[in-house]
Amino acid sequence: MFVGFSGSTGSVKSDQYILGWSFKNGGKAESLDISQISDPPPSSPPPSEGKNSSLNLILGATISTVAFLIIFLGGIVYLYKKRKYAEVLEQWEKEYNPQRYSFRTLYKATKGFRENHLLGA
C-alpha cells in the first residue's frame, strides 16, 4: 500500500499539517473524533521581507558599484599605458630602418630614460 499527500498554495509559502489519520489493515477504519484532535501548531511568521530585501539591495548595489569601478579604472589604466607608449611611424622609417626599436622597448630598457640606465654613448 502506498499513501501520499500533496498540497499547494502557489507561490505563497504555507505550512500544511495532517492532524488526524485513521487506518485499519483489512477492514474499515475507525471514524475520527474531531474533538480529540489538537489544534495545529502556530504557523511561523513569514520572514521579514523588508529587512532581507533592503540587505539584498544594499549588497547588490555595493557589489555592482565596486565591479564597475574596477572595470572603469582598469580601462583608464589601459588607455593611459597605450597612449604613453604610442608612436607614429613615418613612411621612410618603415622602409629604411628595419631594426628600429619601439619607444616602449627603449623606455623599459632605460627605466624611463634615466641617466644611469643609458644604453650607449
Image (cartoon, grey):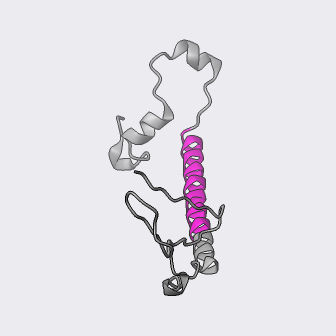
Magenta-drawn segment: 59-85
Which residue is most to the top? 95
Q: Residue at x 51, y 17 (%)?
A: 97
Name the chief secondary structure element in magenta: helix
- Answer left or right for 33 relative to 26: right
Q: Residue furthest front?
A: 27
Location of residue 118 in the rendering, given as x and y in whole percent from the top left corner = 36, 41
Compared with residue 25, is residue 33 higher up or lower down, i.e. above or below?
below
Give me the residue at 56% from left, 44% from top: 84
- Above or below residue 121? Residue 31 is below
Quarter residue 48 falls in:
bottom right
Residue 81: within the magenta?
yes
Hey, which quadrant is residue 8 in on the image? bottom right
* Quarter of the figure that contains the C terminus: top left
Location of residue 36 with respect to 80 vertically, above or below:
below
- Residue 24 location, quadrant: bottom left
Of the pair 86 and 23, the residue shown nearer to us:
23
